Amino acid sequence: MDRILRPTFVFDSSAEDCSSPERDEESAGGSTVEECIVGCSAPEVNAGETVIQGPRTKVCTSSLDSGSTSSGCSWCISVTLSSTGAEQVNGRDAEIAEVFTPKILKGNDKDKNKNVYRFVCPYAGQFLCSLTSLVFVMEGEGEVLYNTVSWDPRLLDGLSKTDKSAGPLYDIKCFNGSISRLHLPHCEIFSEEDMDRLSVAHFTNGNVAIMNPLKVTETHVMIDIKDLSIFGLIKRMIFRSSPVVAQVLVFLRPITMREEENILDVHLLPWNVPLSEVKDQHAENTHIKTSSKCRLTPGTQYRLCCQPEGSTVQPATEEFEFNFGPNYHPTFEVFVNVRNKEVKLSLMNSTEGREVWVPRRILLTGQDVDLPVHRQLMASEFVNKHRSPLIQRVSSVMTIADGLRAKGMITPEMYDKIHDTKPRQNKMRALLKALDSGGASVKAEFYRLLKENEPHLVDELDSGPNRPQ
């Protein structure tokens, strides 16, 4: 498991600058600590924690590598990482979370499509889930099972009308061990005045208890726990909505028979919604990785822009909502000509007319999108039915062969034979022989490439009464 450090320090900027700091050197681990002693009341800080003190604040988000030192008396602190990677602040070891990737199990008979995450903890410590960003503080070895559950509106009946869900709802169980503390990820952007707006709802046996956090960092809400069941973040909506950290997720639907357009599904979601949950719900689509982070305001209208012109985006505008499941429907759909290899997407605040997610290049080629089985069979039937006209009329034989080879669907030997064979009709015969040896999935990819390069030929051959749909 990897170890991570995300140091973020917020200190009182009103403290005097220090011209001669007092040094306290510790030989263990080769670490050194410098501490300002003139007018400084800086508190101890753990890795990843935010501490706010005094009427004014400054923020340092410098990246600290092992062996490097960040110093500066205006910050009233100097940090050195020891040779073992342990961070020390004011002479005290900070907790370091070990990152793990849980095993994903399928749910029970009642909900077979639900992800259940499993973590087998090897020893006591603090552990960060790479898929959900949950942090478990374990007292020893044990097995943890956890999954998201729906925010049933009835669960919130006992809460104040100003309390709204602020994160996914997690059902957590632990076997042969115990969890002493839980860190729930949030997506809020806090000022000094609203650090106390978040709390944790704990649901057991139809009852709900509100837990005040031990601490709220820039990324997590920390609570001590004794009994495990269902936990979820709630936020008091006293003032008008403020921006939160959000994500723009892009998925490519599988291309279907006779389709002349690629369809992109674009989701606007809070940052603490796990990508794994959205991907599982849209398993037939391909997630296109791109830098997704942005700031959005709940209740605000946004407009998705797409280049090149001629692509269709629907709807024209949509409101960003705090959606924590169970259903993650796309916010926007984008229809792009199948010949386009890439598009540029950006997001505008419709009210203010400004970009909140600057243009990103979205590549539509090289995505491993498979046709469903029944459509693979239809593509296979197309090839088998139209062998003679394909031999006579396909002109882009090598272009299609290039695409099949790039995906490993034909061997280098097959490719070389197709390349060396002449004339073009015999070249196509060699390609069809390669398709026969590859089966339905290879013929489906041939159909897609042919549709992309010679759409008019495909339309003409498909125009019969038994054409695939």
Image (tube, rainbow, N blue to C red):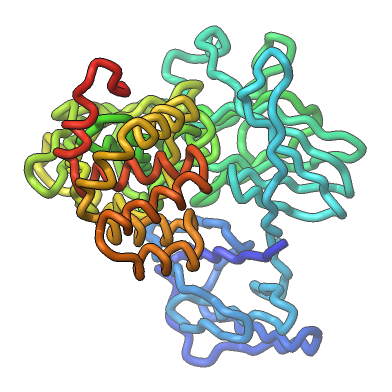
Q: Quadrant of the C terminus?
A: top left
Q: Quadrant of the N terminus?
A: bottom right
The picture places residue 139, in percent across and down from the top left corner, at: 86, 48
- Which residue corresponds to the image point at 72% horizontal and 84% vertical from the top-left? 83
154 to 343, vertically: above or below: above
- Which residue corresponds to the image point at 48% horizontal and 44% vertical from the top-left? 436
Q: Which is more toward the observer, 38 or 273?
A: 273
384 to 138, vertically: above or below: above
Labels in figure, total: 0
The picture places residue 428, in percent across and down from the top left corner, at: 32, 53
179 to 235, vertically: above or below: below
**Would residue 391 appear left or right of 126 to someone viewing this image?**
left
209 to 38, vertically: above or below: above
Q: Which is more toward the observer, 405 or 23?
A: 405
The picture places residue 267, in percent across and down from the top left corner, at: 34, 35
Looking at this view, name the residue that lies furthest to the right: 176
State whether residue 445 appears in this view.
yes
**Residue 448, image quadrant:** top left
Looking at this view, name the residue that lies furthest to the bottom: 20
- Which residue corresponds to the image point at 72% horizontal and 15% vertical from the top-left? 109
State whether residue 267 appears in this view.
no
- Which residue corresponds to the image point at 21% horizontal and 49% vertical from the top-left? 453
Q: Which is more toward the observer, 365 or 131?
A: 365
The picture places residue 419, in percent across and down from the top left corner, at: 35, 67
Q: Which is more toward the observer, 31 or 338?
A: 338
